[in-house]
Image (cartoon, rainbow, N blue to C red):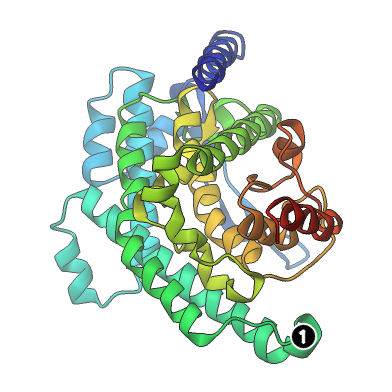
């Protein structure tokens, strides 16, 4: 049964890739233009921006440096030019994050391979999001609005929170390997990722984003569900996350508290969907890191009516029943595949389960 579903998914992905690759028109990098914005003052004394459009390739030749400039100089195809743009984007992301470090450290990091710098950038960004956002989230829901959000006092114990932080921090170095590995594969041109929105235009960008996220949602659902349904997946990997199986053991810090391989498996759909759906490379990576924000939200045990969004009320049920609400952002996949349990149905379900178990 599972093999048949997997084969069907692969077939659908192949059809989607074929249609999107050969039917949807794509402009090559050499055809694109760049308008360099320059400050100026109009007759009313107000600041404006202006500039003449120039060929993007010419602009890149004058402004790129390092490995990206060398790749562009020897480019013989659109794929080569794409690679130069991906390299430039990676260096920009590295400078954006690593620029917070002391100058002496930055100069030393320039001797590192780009993949190593990208790993460090991903690790620092992940730590910042996890610790910074988690701390702010916990402060507001427990100390500022705690009496309103948790009137029964069902907040997690400090020991549970510290354990979640320990598990997450041990996993983050391996989680942080996924973005640079994916970037390396994207740079080789093996995926349908693209560097500039103008290659397809805004309308297709939006359409591709919707298709991409629909596939990601379905794949995350099945990855998550199989980690429960396949015994070895649960007993070897996923059980670590489900140690927190009651509402008062969940916290914003539980969102990344997985076995490292478990966390990577659940993030892989963001990457492998690039093989059959064109996706803007920077948007893809922002969505990948955005899951860290989302998973903080769905583990805070705050009951809110947010259907069709898979909010914390739904995900807390997942942690208590183990059989329901496997989706990531929305409840649709659970509804389609029969695993949806609404918050208002939870009490009746638990009573039936207790009766059937003789309790």
Say above or below: 304 vs 144: above
Kind of element beneath mark 1: loop
Q: Is residue 187 left or right of residue 346?
A: left
Instruction: Where is residue 191? Give x, y as percent.
Output: 41, 26
Residue bearing the label numbered 1: 152
In the rendered image, which quarter contains the C terminus?
bottom right
Instruction: Where is residue 55? Give x, y as percent.
Output: 47, 30
Instruction: Where is residue 333? Give x, y as percent.
Output: 70, 36
**Residue in the foreground of this view, choosing between 213 and 155:** 155
Q: Quadrant of residue 47?
A: bottom right
Mark 1 neighbour class, 10 Å CA radius: few under 14, some 14 to 19, many 20 or more: few
In the rendered image, which quarter contains the N terminus?
top right
**Residue in the foreground of this view, choosing between 316 and 188:** 316
User: In this view of the protein, can residue 176 be seen by the observer?
Assistant: no
User: In this view of the protein, can residue 155 be seen by the observer?
Assistant: yes
Furthest-front residue in this view: 358
x 40%, y 31%: residue? 57
Say above or below: 161 vs 28: below
Say above or below: 150 vs 23: below
User: Number of labelled discs?
Assistant: 1
Q: Is residue 329 left or right of residue 94?
A: right
Instruction: Where is residue 101? Give x, y as percent.
Output: 29, 74
**Residue in the foreground of this view, choosing between 100 and 343:** 343
x 71%, y 90%: residue? 144
Q: Quadrant of residue 39?
A: bottom right
**Residue in the foreground of this view, choosing between 334 and 188:** 334
x 43%, y 60%: residue? 240
x 44%, y 47%: residue? 234
Q: Is residue 115 left or right of residue 124?
A: left
Say above or below: 165 vs 50: below
């Amino acid at each position: 049964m599972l093999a048949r579903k997997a084969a069907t998914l692969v077939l659908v992905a192949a059809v989607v890739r074929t249609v999107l690759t050969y039917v949807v028109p794509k402009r090559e990098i050499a055809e694109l233009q760049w308008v360099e914005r320059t400050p100026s003052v109009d007759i009313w004394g107000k600041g404006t921006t202006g500039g003449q459009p120039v060929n993007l390739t010419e602009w890149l030749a004058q402004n790129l440096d390092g490995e990206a400039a060398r790749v562009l100089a020897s480019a013989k195809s659109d794929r080569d030019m794409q690679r130069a743009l991906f390299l430039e984007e990676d260096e920009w992301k590295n400078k954006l994050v690593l620029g917070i470090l002391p100058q002496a450290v930055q100069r030393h990091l320039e001797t590192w391979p780009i993949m190593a710098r990208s790993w460090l950038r991903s690790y620092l960004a992940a730590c910042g999001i996890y610790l910074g956002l988690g701390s702010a989230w916990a402060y507001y829901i427990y100390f500022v609005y705690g009496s309103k959000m948790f009137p029964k006092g069902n907040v997690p114990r400090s020991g549970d929170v510290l354990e979640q932080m320990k598990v997450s921090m041990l996993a983050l170095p391996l989680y942080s390997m996924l973005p640079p590995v994916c970037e390396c594969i994207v740079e080789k041109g093996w995926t349908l990722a693209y560097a500039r929105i103008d290659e397809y235009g805004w309308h297709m960008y939006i359409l591709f984003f919707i298709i991409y996220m629909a596939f990601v949602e379905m794949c995350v659902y099945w990855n998550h569900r199989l980690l429960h349904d396949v015994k070895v997946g649960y007993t070897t990997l996923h059980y670590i996350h489900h140690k927190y199986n009651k509402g008062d053991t969940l916290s914003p810090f539980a969102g990344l508290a997985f076995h490292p391989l478990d966390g990577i498996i659940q993030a892989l759909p963001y990457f492998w969907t690039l093989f059959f759906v064109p996706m803007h490379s920077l948007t893809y990576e922002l969505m990948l890191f955005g899951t860290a924000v989302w998973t903080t939200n769905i583990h805070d045990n705050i009951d809110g009516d947010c259907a069709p969004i898979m909010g914390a009320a739904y995900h807390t049920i997942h942690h208590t029943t183990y059989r329901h609400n496997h989706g990531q952002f929305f409840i649709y996949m659970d509804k389609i595949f029969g695993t949806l349990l609404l918050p208002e149905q939870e009490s009746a379900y638990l009573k039936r389960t207790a009766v059937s178990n003789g309790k």
